[in-house]
Image (cartoon, rainbow, N blue to C red):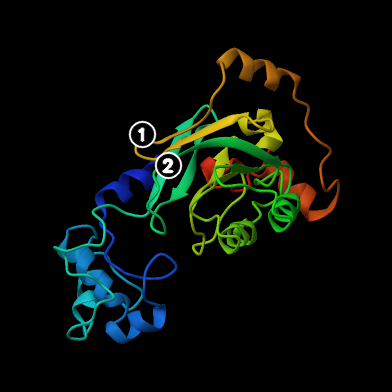
Amino acid sequence: MPLTIDDFDRVSRRTPLWADLKPGGRFTAVDLGQAGGSGVVAKRLVAAGLADGAALTATGRTFAEEAARAGERRGQEVVRPLEQPLKPTGGLVILRGNLAPDGCVVKVAGHERLRHRGPARVFDREEDAMAAVTRREIRAGDVVVIRYEGPRGGPGMREMLGVTAALVGEGLGEQVALLTDGRFSGATRGLMAGHVAPEAAVGGPIAAVEEGDTISFDVEARRLDVEMPEATLRERLARWRAPAPRYTSGVFAKYVALVSSAAEGAVTRPR
C-alpha cells in the first residue's frame, strides 16, 4: 500500500483529539485503563467513521466487535465524548518550505504555539546543543538547529528528547523553537520540527543554515523556512562539503550506505 509523509497530515486534519493524555494532557495510561482502555478510543473511531469496523483483528473478531466489548466507566474524563473533542484535528502536521523541501514533522498535541520567528543557533550534533542549553547560552526567541543527526548522519535518526527536556527545564519550552533532521519521542514538548528532509548529511538545506539566520515556523500555513534569497541558499549549498562519516566499517557503515530519507520512512534498501 503506498504511504507518503503527506498522508499523515491528511489523516491528522480529519481525526479529532479525544484522549486527554500526557505529556500534553492531564491523564496517564493507567487512567486510560481505568476509564475503559483503548477500546473506548476504538468506539469513538468506529462511531465517527474513522476506522474500518469490518477489519479483522488478531483475536479473529472485527475492529467494531472489539470496540463494542469495551466497558466505559461512567463519568470518566480521560476520553472525551464524540461530539466534544479536545481539538478538532489530530496532533501531527507536516511542514514544507525551503528548509524542508521533502517535509518535516511537528507534534502540536503538547503545545498551542503555531508560529515562531527567531535567530538560528546551529549545532552539528546533539551533545553540542545540550551543552549550550546547560550553559544557559540559549535565549528566549532562539531557534535551536540540530543537524547531522538524520538516518545517515546520526546514523539512525538519534532521538532529541534530552535537549527538548532540558529546554523545558530551563523555562524555555514555550519561548524557543527547535528543528532537527533527527527524531523525537512522544514525550517531546514545545514547538519542535523533527525528521527534516533532506537531511544535512546528504546536503539538504538544513546544512546551509548559519548562526544568526532568521528561521520562521508557520504551522497553519505548513511552512518551515530560512529567510534568505534562494540564490544565497543555492550558493551556500554549492560550497557545502559532506563531513567525514562517523563510521567507516561495520553495521553502522552498512546502514548509512543503504538507508533512505526520513521522508520515505528511513528504511534500508539494496543498491
Q: Is residue 115 left or right of residue 249?
A: left
86 over 221 or under it: above or below: below
Q: What whole-number distance in Å separates the C-alpha atoms at marks 1 and 2?
A: 10 Å
Q: Is residue 6 left or right of residue 145?
A: left
Q: Amino acid at mark 2?
A: Ile
Q: Residues within 10 Å of mark 1 (few under 14, many from 20)?
A: few
**Identity of the residue furthest to the top in this view:** 231
**Front disc: 1 or 2:** 1
The residue under the point 56% across, 16% down is: 230
Q: Secondary structure at mark 2?
A: strand
The x and y percentages for residue 204 are 63, 31
The x and y percentages for residue 16 are 25, 57
Q: Are marks 1 and 2 in contact (CB under 8 Å)?
A: no
195 over 81 or under it: above or below: above
The x and y percentages for residue 107 are 44, 52
Q: Amino acid at mark 1?
A: Ala
Q: Quadrant of the C terminus?
A: top right
- Confirm whether residue 3 shows in the render: no
* Residue nearest the viewer, comparing 114 with 56: 114
Residue that numbered label 2 is attached to: 94
Residue 27 position by quadrant: bottom left
58 over 267 or under it: above or below: below
Residue 58 position by quadrant: bottom left
Q: Secondary structure at mark 1?
A: loop
Residue that numbered label 1 is attached to: 221
Q: Earlier in the sequence, mark 1 or mark 2?
A: 2
The residue under the point 64% across, 61% down is: 162
The residue under the point 58% across, 42% down is: 142
